[in-house]
Image (cartoon, rainbow, N blue to C red):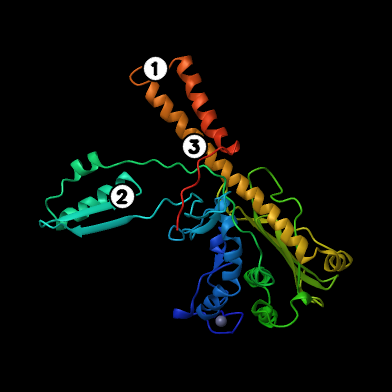
Amino acid sequence: MLHCYRCSTALEGDKISDEHLFLQALGGRLHSEDLLCEDCNSNWGSHPDGDLSKALQPLAVALNVRRASSRGNHPKIAGIAPDGTKIKMDSSGKPELQNFTFNQKDLAGGGKQISLIARSEKEARRSLEDLKQKYSGIDVEKTLAEAKRVSEKFTAPIAFPAKLTFPEIFRSLFKTALDFYVLKGGDRAIAKKLSPVVDGVGNLHDSIFWSLQLEPFPGYKGTVTHTIALVGSSTEHLLYAQVTIFGCIRILALLDDNYSGPDLAVGHIENPLGVDPTPNDIRPVTFTRAQIDTIKTSWPTEASIQANFAELSKIAQKRMNENASMERGREALFAKLASISEGRPPTAEDINEAINAFREAYLGENEFEEPPPTKVS
Ligand SMILES: [Zn+2]
């Protein structure tokens, strides 16, 4: 019988709980029911996990992180347009259109006047069909045919606030280190002794050392990884883990400074962008005690970590905005092709025209000569 490493409750019946080592909100996939009980999982789920999730949510949306579970769509995030307008974005990072609105009033001569604003043809049709259940006189097709259509393209580059909350996010990453240690057969008594660090008890800087990689998104282009490495050395008498989120926010978790257990060197890597969603085992880099001592004293200040995180967020925002303009270019290209080559194969001239439409739509944003963004109150 396994027991929760935080509170020692037996993991059986309704105490069983699925713990994600990297947060689902950040696209984490590795999970286990052998680590924490339901109470501890949900307790840590709000703090510190909720804090980490909140701080990194905009980044996850901008990078188009794919959640493993289908019910786990990203919550909406707040964005800021260049003119300072606040915008709501949906879970894919697209700005949300004006909300669905519905109004009705009684007419003097009997009957009702109903007006509605829908965000799509599909939504309008569904609403009208619902209304028809109540008011059989509604002619859905005729209403749709006569409806006023407004096309509002959102083309402004969007920014979002980027700030890490210290030290909560590092408490959450420390929990990932403990989870991994226990998952790999580590001593639950050691994990239990260390678990107050996750609660923020004691001097966190005895156990957590942090850095932000100066070059965001290392490795091959387009890949952003979460990694964890666990090393136990019987000769250096050290047990430590390195946890890295999005390839750049990294902590060193010192689990035992006087380690006498067996040698350990295990690692894990996953790609939250879903390019290769399969988590893999990797062999971690190991450090000597002298190197660990250097890391403990030379890692950057909170201010420089914030500055680097802001830089990283800018890269993600740029990527998000480029994806959006590429999408607009693609739409323009296909719309043009469909309109000019109807019923005949496209000529070279048609294709040139379509490419020009693409270029115009794609470059449009980069020139920043855009109509004001859709306002959402
Ligand atoms: Zn527990």
Q: CA distance from mark 3 to mark 1?
A: 24 Å
Circles 2, 3 touching at the beta carbon (< 8 Å): no
- Residue under the image location 57 percent in, 80 percent down: 4
Going by the numbered disc 3, the residue's amino acid type is: Arg
Q: Is residue 296 visible?
A: yes
Q: Residue furthest left?
A: 109
- Residue under the image location 36 percent in, 41 percent down: 150
The disc at residue 332 is none
In this figure, which residue is indicated by the disc labeled 2? 123
In the rendered image, residue 345, in percent from the top left (x then y), is placed at 39, 17
In this figure, which residue is indicated by the disc labeled 1? 345
- Residue under the image location 48 percent in, 61 percent down: 75
Going by the numbered disc 1, the residue's amino acid type is: Pro
In the rendered image, residue 83, in percent from the top left (x then y), is placed at 57, 50
Q: CA distance from mark 2 to mark 3?
A: 22 Å
Ligand 1 closer than 8 Å to the CB at disc 3? no
Residue 169 sits above or below residue 93 on the image: below
Between residues 266 and 117, which one lies in front from this camera angle? 117
In the rendered image, residue 110, in percent from the top left (x then y), is placed at 10, 57
Side of 204 where 76 appears, left or right: left
Between residues 147 and 53, which one lies in front from this camera angle? 147
Pointer 2: residues within 10 angstroms few (<14), some, or many (20+)? few
Sooner in the amino-acid sequence: mark 3 or mark 1: 3
Side of 158 where 135 appears, left or right: left
As helix, strand or loop, the secondary structure at mark 2 comes to: helix
Pointer 1: residues within 10 angstroms few (<14), some, or many (20+)? few
The disc at residue 328 is 3
As helix, strand or loop, the secondary structure at mark 1 comes to: loop
Q: Quadrant of residue 296?
A: bottom right
